Image: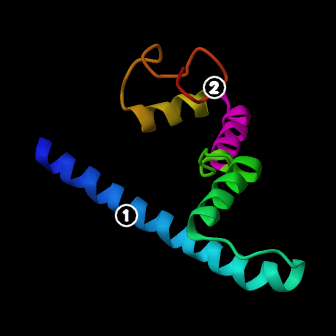
Amino acid sequence: MNARWVKRGLKIGAIGLVAVAVFGCVVMSLWNWLAPAVFGLHSITFWQALGVLILSKILFGGFHGRHGGHWKRRMNERWQQMTPEEREQFCQGMFGPRSRSDAPGQGSSDPRPA
């Protein structure tokens, strides 16, 4: 089982390296196609393109995932609008037939576990 995880990790790492190389090539190609003609700038190398890509992620996008934020906000809005009976029914459906004190997040109005 351990060898399976190592193989899976190597596969994910290889896919990540290929993705970085592809994005670097795309940035380099677009820069070298547009920037010299439009702005009069010099062409860049692959490594400079990776630097531009990383710099743009830091300045404009960060390194955090963007998925889930809208879902969490919507779920919190729905949780706030539920009656205590609806909340109990929801918890029973999500967490099974456990007591109310066992269900995560029951101490506050936030549906996320503490």
Q: Is residue 79 left or right of residue 114?
A: right
Q: Quadrant of residue 35?
A: bottom right
Q: Nearer the viewer, residue 60 or 35?
A: 35
Crowd class of label 2 (few under 14; some 14 to 19; many from 20; radius 10 Å) = few
The residue type indicated by label 2 comes to Pro
The residue type indicated by label 1 comes to Ile
Q: Residue at x 60, y 34 (%)?
A: 86
Q: Quadrant of the N terminus?
A: top left
Q: Helix, strand, or loop for circle 2?
A: helix
Vertical relation: 80 (above or below) 42: above
- Give how far across and how far down residue 78 sits, in percent: 69, 41
Vertical relation: 21 (above or below) 112: below
Q: Which residues are magenta?
A: 71-83
Q: Nearer the viewer, residue 39 or 68?
A: 39
Q: Residue at x 48, y 68 (%)?
A: 21
User: Which residue has dot 1 on it?
Assistant: 15
Q: Nearer the viewer, residue 43 or 92?
A: 43
Q: Is residue 57 left or right of residue 111?
A: right
Q: Helix, strand, or loop for circle 1?
A: helix
Q: Is residue 25 left or right of residue 7?
A: right
As for residue 81 lying within the magenta part, the answer is yes
User: Which residue has dot 2 on it?
Assistant: 84
- Give how far across and how far down residue 43 sits, in percent: 71, 76
Vertical relation: 39 (above or below) 84: below
Q: Quadrant of the C terminus?
A: top right
